[in-house]
Amino acid sequence: MKESAPVGSASTPDFSNWSCPLPLAGYPTIVMGHGGGGKLGNELVEHLFVPAFRNPALENLGDAAVLDLPAGRIAMSTDSFVVQPLFFPGGSIGELAVNGTVNDLAVSGAIPLYLTASFILEEGLPMAQLAAIVEAMAKAAAVAGVQVVTGDTKVVERGHGDGIYINTAGIGVIRPGISVSPRQAKPGDAILVSGTIGDHGMAILSVREGLEFESQIRSDCAPLNSLIADVLTAAGASVHVMRDPTRGGLASTLNEIAQASGVGISLEEASLPVKPQVQSACELLGFDPVYVANEGKVVFFVAPEAADLVLNALRAHPLGRDAARIGTVTADHPRLLVARTAMGANRVIPLQIGEQLPRIC
Amino acid sequence: MKYLTEFRNGEVAQRIAQQIHRIATRPWKIMEVCGGQTHSIIKNGIDQMLPAGIEMIHGPGCPVCVTPLELIDKALAIAAQPGVIFCSFGDMLRVPGTECDLFQVKGNGGDVRVVYSPLDAVELAMKNPDRQVVFFGVGFETTAPANAMSVHLAKRRGLKNFSLLVSHVLVPPAIEAILSAPGHRIDGFLLAGHVCSVMGYWEYPPLAERFRVPLVVTGFEPLDLLDGIRRTVLQLESGRHEVENAYERMVTFEGNKPAQKLMSEVFEVCDRAWRGIGVIPKSGWKLSEAYREFDAEERFQLSGIRTVESPLCHSGEVLRGMMKPAECPAFGKECTPRHPLGATMVSTEGACAAYFNYGRFISAEQLAGAGLSAVGQPNDNWGSK
């Protein structure tokens, strides 16, 4: 089949291992009929989605997936993914869609088990791009150990979408004895982050039209459930809060926790792990890495006596090598995030109003 | 990181701050001209490290802040026209005009794009020959070389669909205006390092002589700022008033000659209105006769624009150093970054936004816990979702 270059893509995805099933070859791009519930839609399911996500619950192709769940409390989460460009250094919208929901479940203390996947496709989306995205989702699901058990496809007219939007929902079972919540930060808690901040946001920005800059920055997009499992095995009930600082970055997550728990947070600015190339790009654009998005990082609030235990568990995991202790919960200045600057002065880090904007000079 | 971490060393900063404490025997008011410096001072808490008598006055050097509202209204009118691709630096998008901002124009179907360089807008014009591409060229001498280059390239390539909505402003006339104002309070200036990296500092000795003020070319990192302040205080304490270069790794006396040559070809000096301040004679650049065809104000018919400033906004006094952001009655109340009344609350380099964003208004009890000093107590539901 003819391969068209991915629109707005800086890192061309590798289709070398992708073999397009014959019945789809007639349509190199998505047409309205692929969402019409007829033969074309069935072909997408039969020749693309089912082979990629293959599992017994999905293969029943019923109106709903029927699942056997272990006893206990169930966590459920949903997230929609809209990103430009669709492919970026270190990943694509496919990995984001799987890892995003896996991570939301994992930071709730759940073992993620099953996902749904809904696709809103724009007429004209190259089939090869869709295939690459679905492949990426399948790989990410396999790495995270979750199954995509049901899904849906709709097609919108050209000009009414951004190529592809994906929604995933997921369920997981809460680990026995674990109770984490953004309301449970306590004065004295140590705050740890699992690695460098700002990688994902700057990777996306480096390939966004009009702002491209040459860089080695790759998205940190990754499933966090295995890292979190290691931490919970090591520290169990000493972990009070877990959050993945995605949109709005670390600053937004910490502000939200300070609000929810009614505590103050004091941050040591010098201890924040930031890759030099991310720091440089931020300087160039006038951004503060504390506000830049992450897709593979988690923040832990833990009892002070468990801090070293958690730090060691994090650093022993491939996704946690750059983990650092970054701050402390305090009863002073409730609901405020206050950073101690490298100069030894203090500054408040508030919630951002909107996205950070590249400055003039 | 080379040229970054070295200038953020906390121990060295403490040493310079201690020197300033030792040499300062009297209160002094020092104005940092550039908004980037204001941002860095507040972000790093430099002002908290100084002796109580040394007061930093925030100057008019935020390009977003001093761009007249009327020009922003013109930008909005052009951006809303069909067939136009309107390009801007990111932080102009949120600046409110009389009716709306560029984000809202974009939301209503206008093709508004954030670019990092005006040369990207020239590329867009080449790729879209059937569209009019307009670049919003604001700023001080710092952004002027790239803007000049964009017009120069457009002319050389014979582009008929590229134009510049231009409102350049110049630092020396602004300093002259501030020092000429009756009752001004400024004892010394930190000159804007980036402006001087382009222009050099040959323009400033007559000002230092005439107004008998020290002028110190200063960078943007914490150690740069502390060193600039230290040198200014040293001059003041010893009764000197010289132009001094504390940013030698970037700035020479002559500046960037090729850039200056290009700018003198593309631009000519004009009187310019500064938002909140008024018209300052010979304080701006407009496109010269040879490049007038690239002036967006000439290319687009703009009529019926009615510009109305908020009567509550005191950004003019803030920009002239007559009022601290938190002293404004509207600060943090009617005026917040979410609902800015004036541009000083919008741009990250605006003094009001810097004060607000770094929490310089939180209640005294909360600040006592955080080790900060209190300035103003607004009622905005700050920090909550």
Image (spheres, helix red, strand yellow):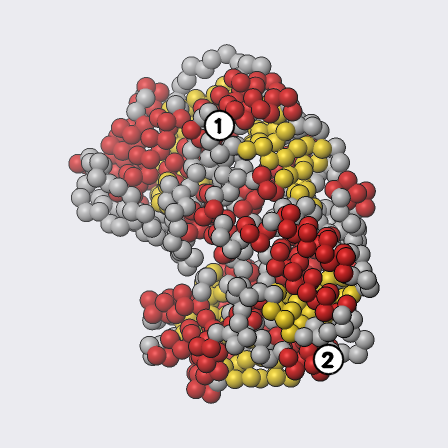
Label 2 chain ID: B
Q: Which mark is residue A315?
A: 1
| Residue A72 visible, this angle | yes
- In three-dimensional space, the C-alpha distance between marks 2 and 1, rounded to whole angstroms, equals 60 Å
Q: Residue furthest bottom?
A: B289
Q: Amino acid at mark 2?
A: Phe
- Indicate which label's residue lies in the foreground, 2 or 1: 2
Label 1 chain ID: A
**Image quadrant assignment for residue A14:** top left
Question: Does B340 appear above or below B81?
Answer: above
Q: Which mark is residue B211?
A: 2
Residue B258 horizontal/vertical position (percent): 44, 77
| Residue B81 visible, this angle | no
Q: Are marks 2 and 1 on the same chain?
A: no
B376 or B219: nearer the viewer: B219
Residue B236 horizontal/vertical position (percent): 75, 69
